[in-house]
Image: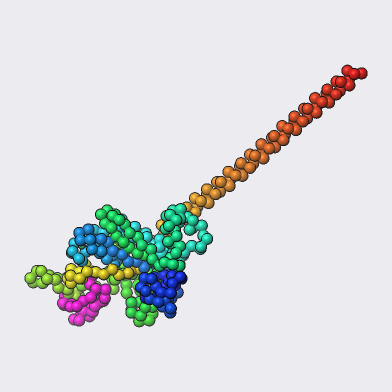
Amino acid sequence: MEICLTCGTIKKSSDTQCSVCETPYEENTADVSPPGDDLCIARFNGHFECRSCGHGVALNGLDKDGNILCGKCGIEQAFNWDNWDSILTHAHNTADFAGWNKPQANSPLWKGLAEEMGEDTAEMFKRIGDSRSILSLSDGAFRGLSYEVEASPGYPICEQCKKPLTIKIEKSSLKTACSECSLAATYEIPSNRKAYSPLEGIISFENRTDALEVKQESSKGGAALAITCPQCGGALENIKAGTITKCPYCYTSCHIPSRIFQKTTGKVNKEAPWWLVFRGPSKARSKSNSRVEIIKHKKALEKQKMLEDMEQAEKEEAYRRKANNRIILIVALIFIVTLTAAFVLNR
Ligand SMILES: [Zn+2]
Ligand SMILES: [Zn+2]
Ligand SMILES: [Zn+2]
Ligand SMILES: [Zn+2]
């Protein structure tokens, strides 16, 4: 599968430049393979509408406690599992049906998908990698929350040198490394977000576990917040979101979670893409497969019915022929008897 080396989305064969990051394809693409046989990867980005101020709150990782902070109005709000379930299903469907395992052009799976999800959706899936890269999902008002997310089949690339990363999946974590600059990272799925069982790993700064989270402390006055090193308690200044900072006192690697970043700086988190690794068939594939089975079963039933009808017609035909023959025989017999009688009487 070919990807754009700037943003990691699937390459569109009909274009000369990436529609997601607008970089010309030219030499800027690479052919990448999944890190395992039954794995697929989705590039993902999205936001939801703050219930209080309407700001688009970035969904930049899987939250640890079912709450996400709106950096604009400062209100913490619930982001339900149901929302994540639909979002993860959408990302998995897209990566599975339009990525490395994309069904052949004339495969019955496409017919199954069209019957299951509608002709339009099947058509959009078909066009991924041809004339489109991403597929959006928006929900008007799902339990008082509307969101808009985008998913694409893709592959993560090194933020420094733009080379595809090496992905290693371990028991409870996922490790990435760059063969070019040796930049490495470890990520974990928060324990409360493991309910979507095909989700095998995530690559998002929010879920990095190889750097400690900074601490946030109230100053003596109570109002202002200070950011400190989780190891030695030293004050950390000018710490940026989305980067690893080394404590100048004890050299511990730290990162600032978006919640603390937004609270202490008053800055709003920007939407940034991240990655989801799935194992096994998506719901779209399983449903399409069962549709295909139903279609096959229906066809088999129709064929059987046709054969039975033909057999019945043949039987009826044979019966009719038999009956006709009997009539002919009887008529012939009557004729012979009449002739014989006439002959005898005439003598
Ligand atoms: Zn791109
Ligand atoms: Zn808000
Ligand atoms: Zn690199
Ligand atoms: Zn320190």
Could you tell whether 101 is left or right of 148 in the image?
right
Q: Is residue 277 visible?
A: no
Q: Residue at 41% x, 70% y: name it.
A: 10
Quarter of the image for residue 310 reads top right
Q: Residue at 26% x, 73% y: name it.
A: 242
Question: Does the magenta-highlighted stretch encompass residue 253?
Answer: yes
Q: Residue at 23% x, 75% y: name it.
A: 240
Question: Does the magenta-highlighted stretch encompass residue 175?
Answer: no
- Foreground residue, 291 or 253? 291
What's the image's color scheme? rainbow
Q: Is residue 339 visible?
A: yes
Quarter of the image for residue 92 reads bottom left
Could you tell whether 290 is left or right of 257 in the image?
right
- Foreground residue, 228 or 41? 41
Q: Quadrant of the C terminus?
A: top right
Report the number of discs. 0
Predominant SS of the magenta segment: loop
Q: Is residue 9 above or below residue 50?
A: below
Q: Residue 12 in the image: x percent, y percent?
A: 43, 70
Quarter of the image for residue 136 reads bottom left
Q: Residue 56 in the image: x percent, y percent?
A: 25, 64
Span of residues in magenta: 232-257
